[in-house]
């Protein structure tokens, strides 16, 4: 197949999933064309089956805001026509699904029908999409897609609850590439971070308010009272400065390292003993899955799709959003006993293997084939 993938080219979950999916499809022999405004962060290697098409936006002074959606739709039309794509797969509803619909209508004037698969990732539904400014467009775009997937059952349920959806939504969970995300020998790094054998707790995110990064600091401040430990904060964003100040206020600054954005996140996870994810909302919890693949158990909130990934009492623990005391208590419980910690680490890896890319990729391929077959049956292709 020739597949166009539209995504945000950032470190966020939807962009990461879209990029890793495209790379895996290319490895399977499909021709994959990325269409976005920058080269995706993880599109970091050459393949004969991978192509990147940049979306350029006019800077005409009439526009207070750059008309990205129009530029994206035009670029999709161009790529579909000249690369003869079979299907478009757009990740994150806003604005990609609506831009795809516009491109689809334009392509019909050239006698071309392009099936569109839309994947819902989370905040495009639970936060941004619920905004009344966008809700009619999101609803329309989902209903006009030829296929729709969601990364968790919880997200699927929320979509039906918040929007008037008239079509089926298929759950295809996020995945992990175990050839990349696995426990690596990084003892020298671990020794540098924790020279006295302290336990290492890790948090990775884009430091937005929804991630409740200040709760991470508060949990750690309680853990360190009982367990000698260090905290690695990976990523960057609007809440970072508040977290740094909170570290000073709580007197834990010397035991917390802010590492900023990192590409080789698997190397950092490989030195971890526990992963903290106290988020207000997570459609799936991809960062937690990456940690589990590196044998790091997870303490998380029970929000969104996290209970579908993190099994309470097996791969870690789930607590209510904001329950800092409860999360700290369970973190201490896991860390204070070496045999118990080892069992949780083994359980985390076993769970991660269920989401191996090799298990999930065929689900997307089969769904593409199903969407194309439906279009043919309707005499659209």
Image (tube, rainbow, N blue to C red):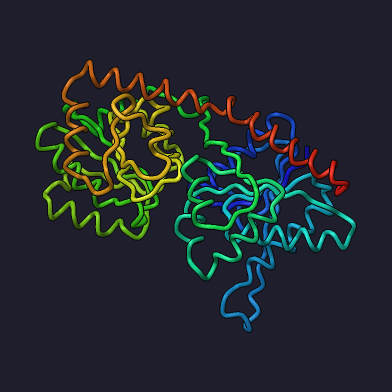
Query: In this view of the protein, which residue sits in the foreground, 144 or 63?
Result: 144
Q: Is residue 47 visible?
A: yes
Residue under the point 64% across and 39% down = 22
Q: Is 242 rendered above or below residue 186? A: below
**Which quadrant does the N terminus fall into?**
top right
Q: Which residue extends farthest bottom?
A: 62
Q: Position of residue 315 (x, y in %)?
A: 34, 26
Q: Position of residue 356 (x, y in %)?
A: 53, 26
Left-right relation of 373 to 176 = right
Q: Position of residue 381 (x, y in %)?
A: 87, 46
Q: How many labels sit on residues?
A: 0
Left-right relation of 230 to 118 = left
Q: Is 185 rendered above or below residue 25? A: above
Q: Is residue 202 visible?
A: no
Left-right relation of 99 to 258 = right
Residue under the point 52% across and 48% down = 121
Residue under the point 20% across and 45% down = 324
Query: In this view of the protein, which residue sits in the foreground, 138 or 102?
Result: 138
Q: Position of residue 174 (x, y in %)?
A: 52, 37
Residue under the point 24% across and 52% down = 214
């Amino acid at each position: 197949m020739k597949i166009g993938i539209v995504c945000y080219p950032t470190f966020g979950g939807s962009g990461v999933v879209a990029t890793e999916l495209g790379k895996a499809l290319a490895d399977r022999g499909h021709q994959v064309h990325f269409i976005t405004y920058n080269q995706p962060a993880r599109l970091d290697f050459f393949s004969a089956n991978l192509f990147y098409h940049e979306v350029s936006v006019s800077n005409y002074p009439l526009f207070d805001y750059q008309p990205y959606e129009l530029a994206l739709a035009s670029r999709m039309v161009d790529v579909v026509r000249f690369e003869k794509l079979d299907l478009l797969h757009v990740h994150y509803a806003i604005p990609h699904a609506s831009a795809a619909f516009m491109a689809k209508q334009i392509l019909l004037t050239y006698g071309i029908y392009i099936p569109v698969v839309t994947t819902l990732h989370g905040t495009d539904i639970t936060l941004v999409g619920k905004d009344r400014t966008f809700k009619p467009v999101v609803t329309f775009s989902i209903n006009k897609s030829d296929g729709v997937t969601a990364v968790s059952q919880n997200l699927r349920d929320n979509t039906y609850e918040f929007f008037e959806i008239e079509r089926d939504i298929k759950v295809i969970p996020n995945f992990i590439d175990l050839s990349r995300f696995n426990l690596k020998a990084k003892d020298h790094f671990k020794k540098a971070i924790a020279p006295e054998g302290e336990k290492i707790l890790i948090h990775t995110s884009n430091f937005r308010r929804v991630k409740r990064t200040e709760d991470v600091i508060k949990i750690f401040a309680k853990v360190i009272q009982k367990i000698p430990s260090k905290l690695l904060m990976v990523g960057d964003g609007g809440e970072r400065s508040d977290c740094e100040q909170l570290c000073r206020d709580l007197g834990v600054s010397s035991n917390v390292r802010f590492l900023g954005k990192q590409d080789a996140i698997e190397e950092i996870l490989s030195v971890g003993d526990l992963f903290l994810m106290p988020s207000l909302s997570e459609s799936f919890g991809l960062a937690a899955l990456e940690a589990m693949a590196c044998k790091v158990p997870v303490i998380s909130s029970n929000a969104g799709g996290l209970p579908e990934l993190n099994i309470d009492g097996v791969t870690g623990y789930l607590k209510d959003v904001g329950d800092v005391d409860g999360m700290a208590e369970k973190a201490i419980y896991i860390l204070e006993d070496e045999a118990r910690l080892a069992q949780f680490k083994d359980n985390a890896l076993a769970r991660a293997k269920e989401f191996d890319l090799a298990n999930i990729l065929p689900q997307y391929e089969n769904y593409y084939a199903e969407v194309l077959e439906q279009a043919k049956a309707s005499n659209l292709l």
